[in-house]
Image: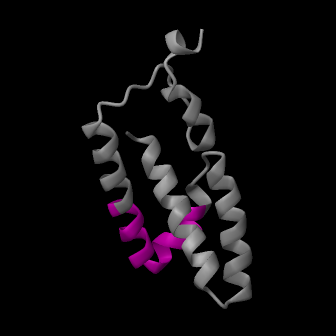
Amino acid sequence: MTCMVCYAQIGVVLAIIKQTKDKKLKETATGAFFSGLFGVTEPAIYGITLPRKRPFVLSCIGGAVSGAIIGAFHSVLYILPSMGFFAIPAYINPKVVQ
């Protein structure tokens, strides 16, 4: 369930990239977005969402809701993954793949 927080954070940063007209913010957010895809969300948190408070709260809510959905469907991680897109294969049952 903790993997969903990473996706919520990069989703909020992507929304900021799409909506902002500030060129410097757009550049910073784009770098934070791509690092977030690989599981490093600290630039997105400390550089983009936390100073603006509202996007940070929205990412926390999004992470909580998506984590609750994953928990409600009893999803299972078969390995302990890193965050980001590298976590997606961890949800695949190895018995089904064989």
Compared to residue 65, the image places residue 74 above or below, namely above
Depth check, front residue: 83 or 18: 18
Does residue 9 show up magenta in the picture? no
Pick out the residue farthest to the left. Answer: 72
Residue 54 magenta:
yes
Query: Which residue is at a point 62% across and 79% down the rendered structure image?
Result: 18
> Which coloring applies here?
one colour
| Residue at left offset 50%, top offset 71% | 49
Q: Is residue 18 left or right of residue 46?
A: right
- Residue drawn at (70%, 73%), measured in percent from left and top? 28
Residue at image x 54%, y 65%? 46
Tell me: residue 83, above or below residue 94.
below
Task: Give above or below for 54 relative to 67.
Answer: below
- Left or right: residue 55 compared with residue 71: right
Give coordinates of residue 90: x percent, y percent.
53, 27
Q: Position of residue 36 (x, y in %)?
A: 62, 54
Camera-side residue of 91 and 49:
91
Q: Is residue 43 left or right of residue 96?
A: right
| x and y, in percent, of residue 19 in the image | 59, 84
Residue extending farthest to the bottom is 21
Q: Quadrant of the N terminus?
A: top left
Residue 96 x, y percent position in the rendering: 52, 14
Magenta portion: prevailing SS class: helix
Q: Which quadrant holds the C terminus? A: top right
**Quadrant location of residue 47?**
bottom right
Judging depth in this view, the residue of 70 and 82 nearest the camera is 70
Is residue 82 something one can see in this rendering?
no
Highlighted magenta segment, given as a residue range: 44-61
